[in-house]
Amino acid sequence: MAARQTQNSGDTTVDSLLTKRKDGKMPDDTPKVELKKRITLFHCVSIIVGIIIGAGIFVSPVGITVQVRSVGMSILMWFVVGVFNTLCALCFAELGACLPESGGEYIYIKRAWGDFPAFLCLWMNYLLITPVTAAASSLVFANYMLRPLFPDCEPPRDGIQLLAALIIALLVAINCHNVNWVTKLQAVITGSKLLALMMVIVIGFIWLGKGNTENFQGSFEGTDLSAGAIAFAFYSGSWAFGGWNYLSFLTEEVVDPHRNLPLGIMISMGIITAVYMLANVAYFAVLTPAEMLQSSAVAVTFLQRTVPGLAYVIPFLIALSVVGALNGGILSVSRLFYVAARNNHLPSIVSMITIKKSTPVPSLVSLLILVVIMQTFGNIFFLIEMMGFSLSIVLIMTFAGQVLLRWTEPGLLRPIKVPVVLPAVLIVFNVAIMCITVYQKPQESSIALVIIACGVPAYLLGTKKDKPKSVQRFIENFTETLQKLLIVTVQDSEDCEDGKDTGSIS
């Protein structure tokens, strides 16, 4: 955006804060505006654990059991899937440590493959992956919060959508106001979830200690070891670990990212794997596999059998778990949009942050709008299938880019380095998942491909330099109006000081 200098040479005005001078530098008396490094190792762990441990472990942790058909194999698969996803997360830890810029897979793909593939990654995240995930989670939250008010029937859909929109708006408002509030809220929610799961685990092991071990006798009998059963069990378990990549969206705000990013990922994945395994052991100590498969909320059935007086707290714990996942997701993904706009792949207003709070308000507001739109769709599961197909493509591009960077940039500083065979295996795994999705859900996959293909003209039009002057003028005026309305400006950086434009109008 063309910058202009304030006419008042005395006091620093809002206009002087919102715009750069024509020489590309901010006035000398202007406070530095940038994203602050506020996220410590403790916050890293609470963010990842809070995002990954959602409502599933309380509601339906039986996706693996329904496939492999035995208690012993179920617990073993939880361990194997946990180790596998930890290795996946370590691939992202390598990329995040050697490319310490917020944006996650978008930045990694951009470095390896260039602008156009990175834009398609952004396109999928912006239109499908991020808003669909948040919309689905917020609807689950609203449904469980309203259920106690409608004991004899399903809650009204309009009420669910309204409450889902309100919780998203509340979390976006908190994220806009103060990052410290967000990380503290995340720490409290994560701690509460872990305490709740520890309660389940302790009760289950007390039950075992009383001699209730019948469900573990012949624990591998009846195991289905067919390739299809193992594959779908692996697929189901991997969804339970989804979210380990979100911390890489926040790299620029992590204190000492070379150390804390990989360490935070490893600690978090270790905690999550252990908690998932122990929670399932506790469930199986009290409930048979058949009872777990028939239950609409396993944790409720578990407590009704063991401590009936505590069963009423489960809907609250489910809602709390979803809020934690939403809060961490909003914090993380808003930085992806912010960084993409800074790289000219979204309108420049999205690359701006508030002057006083240093939060990416335009990015957060755009996320709010997209999520609310997705909440209005009649069949959210249809959107989830499209999102899963798109996510597989993004992961394939990321892991392939990691292999490519080993060849094109062998001298790149890598504080943590995984065997190159690991991302290669992950490419094959995600190709298999994508093929299974296409086979099982051809309609959803086809629509997702059409949406992805629409990113091609969007990229060509959005990055076109010689736009008509009338269009350029409209964009500039619209951007400046939003700047003043939201009191935001581009981040101060070395690029800005060198006179380079860090936020484009596209």
Image (spheres, rainbow, N blue to C red):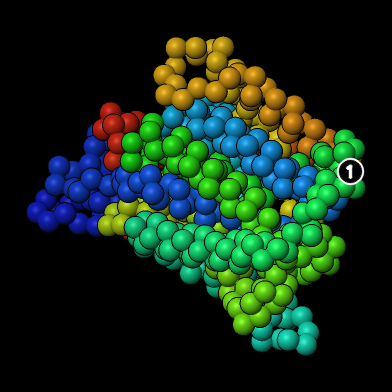
The answer to whether residue 335 shows anywhere in this view is no
Residue at the spot x=29%, y=41% of the render?
492
Q: Position of residue 228 (x, y in %)?
A: 88, 39
**Total marks in image:** 1
Q: Position of residue 103 (x, y in %)?
A: 49, 39
Instruction: Quadrant for residue 150, please give it.
Output: bottom right
Q: Is residue 76 left or right of residue 272?
A: right
Q: Is residue 399 left or right of residue 408?
A: right
Instruction: Quadrant for residue 245, please give it.
Output: top right
Find the residue positioned furthest to the front.
211
Relative to 178, residue 437 above or below: above
Q: Position of residue 162 (x, y in %)?
A: 62, 76
Residue at the spot x=46%, y=25% of the render?
416
71 and 298: which is toward the camera = 71
Query: Which residue position is annotated with label 1?
Result: 224
470 and 199: which is toward the camera = 199
Q: Is residue 376 left or right of residue 30?
A: right
Relative to 152, residue 188 above or below: above
Mark 1 belongs to which amino acid?
Asp
For mark 1, does the 10 Å Cα neighbourhood hold few (<14), some (14 to 19), or many (20 or more) residues?
A: some
Residue at the spot x=28%, y=28% of the render?
498
Relative to 496, residue 349 above or below: below
Residue at the spot x=50%, y=64% of the render?
195
Find the residue positioned furthest to the left.
10
Q: Position of residue 401 (x, y in %)?
A: 60, 23
The answer to whether residue 33 shows anywhere in this view is yes
Placement of the N terminus among the 4 image quadrants: top left
Tell me the element at label 1. Answer: loop
